[in-house]
Amino acid sequence: MKYCFFAFVAMIVLAASCSEDETEPTGRINSVSRLYVSFEEYESSDDGIADTNMRIVKKADSTVFNLDTAHLSMARGGGIILFNPFLKSVIQASANTDVQRDSAIYVTQVQLQGQLSNGGMMASSLLRKVRGMAYHRASDALFVVNADADRSGIFVVDRPNSVSQNRKPWKQFFTGNLPMWGAAYRDNRLFVAKQGTEGGIYVFESIVTRPVNVVDSTASLAPARTLAIENARNLHGMAYDTVRNMLAITDYTDGTTPGTGRILIFENFNGMINGTSITPTRIITGAATLLTQPVDVAIDTRATGQYLYVADRSKKVLRFLISDNGNATPDRIIDTEEYGTPVALSLDSRDESTIPQF
């Protein structure tokens, strides 16, 4: 099978070499709570200037909850976004709409004080509909979920910081026409949302060690199992807090009626994953929530973390308490009408308590 890829230019070298999940980076970690929000618009005006596709809440847990920093990455309209402290970079897929084709993933380096600078890119004709990304530090692997009919698959970039041009950076696992969105990785399992009226969570196992064809780095891949979620209709982004053992995932129905969007929360998630179905322990939904078309969620994974964050295509970024349930009022709301449509987010929440998660 023919495939192509262009250069993936390396990000800055890690300050410490990490080989196990429990390895601690050198030096003390200051408490950080920084929210990256990806916006999909691109050249929405007639002036030919690209819209700002990344905005940041520098102190996402503060009483002042505003998009106070802006950055224009090389993506032609923002899509899925991922931050991991050991990559020291924000990785952002392009929106890749029917109007603006851009099959690439872009790297924005994060400096010590949070300053952003554009770095390298990954590009492939296969990356036409990136719907999820996850990173696993112990294997130094980036997982890219692409949902594009018969070109759908999970593509693995190993050693994403490497500058070597003499190796094949892609493992290409083709999944068939699975309706996939989102990604979370833990304990050699990749969790991906199954979209549609019979929604659930696909569980893929042992991807890092799974072999591929030596000629073209491809293989077929099927989920080890699918965890059905009753009444799930339109699952999208997810977040897994391994300290609390809690998974949150967004869901909505018509995407137009305020209050009908849902955040499904599964506590003791690791204890659920060997079955065939899972049931939310809590659901945030109702008129007071203002949830309309929630597409992504992030959790403050610090031991002291209080909040979860939601990107809603109704042009809102909402903050809820992690403990919220039912028809809860958001703790804070950002109206993004003047900025565009938030389609994904990633939270940099770090302190000493979060080290085992990465």
Image (cartoon, rainbow, N blue to C red):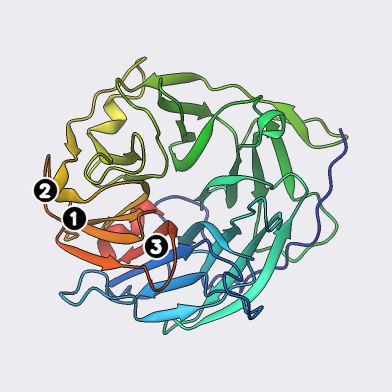
Density class for disc 2 (Cα within 10 Å; few <14, some 14-19, many ≥20) is: some
Q: Position of residue 108 (x, y in %)?
A: 57, 72
Residue beneath label 2, please? 328
For marks 1 and 2, the one nearer the N-term is 1
Horizontal side of residue 27 vs 125, given as left or right: left
Q: Residue at x 58, y 64 (%)?
A: 77
Q: Position of residue 104 (x, y in %)?
A: 69, 57
On screen, residue 351 above or below 128: below
Marks 1,3: beta carbons within 8 A: no
Task: Label 3: state its secondary structure.
Answer: loop
Q: Amino acid at mark 1?
A: Phe
Label 1 vs label 3: CA separation?
30 Å
Q: Find residue 327 and report its image quarter.
A: top left
Label 3 vs label 2: CA separation?
37 Å
Residue beneath label 3, please? 24
Camera-nearest label, 1 or 3: 1
Density class for disc 3 (Cα within 10 Å; few <14, some 14-19, many ≥20) is: some
Closer to the camera in the image, 233 or 5: 233
For marks 3 and 2, the one nearer the N-term is 3
Task: Label 1: state its secondary structure.
Answer: strand
Closer to the camera in the image, 47 or 210: 47
Q: Amino acid at mark 3?
A: Glu
Residue 320: numbered disc:
1
Q: Amino acid at mark 2?
A: Ala
Horizontal side of residue 57 vs 160, given as left or right: left
Q: Residue at x 40, y 35 (%)?
A: 235
Q: Find residue 31 and report its image quarter.
A: bottom left
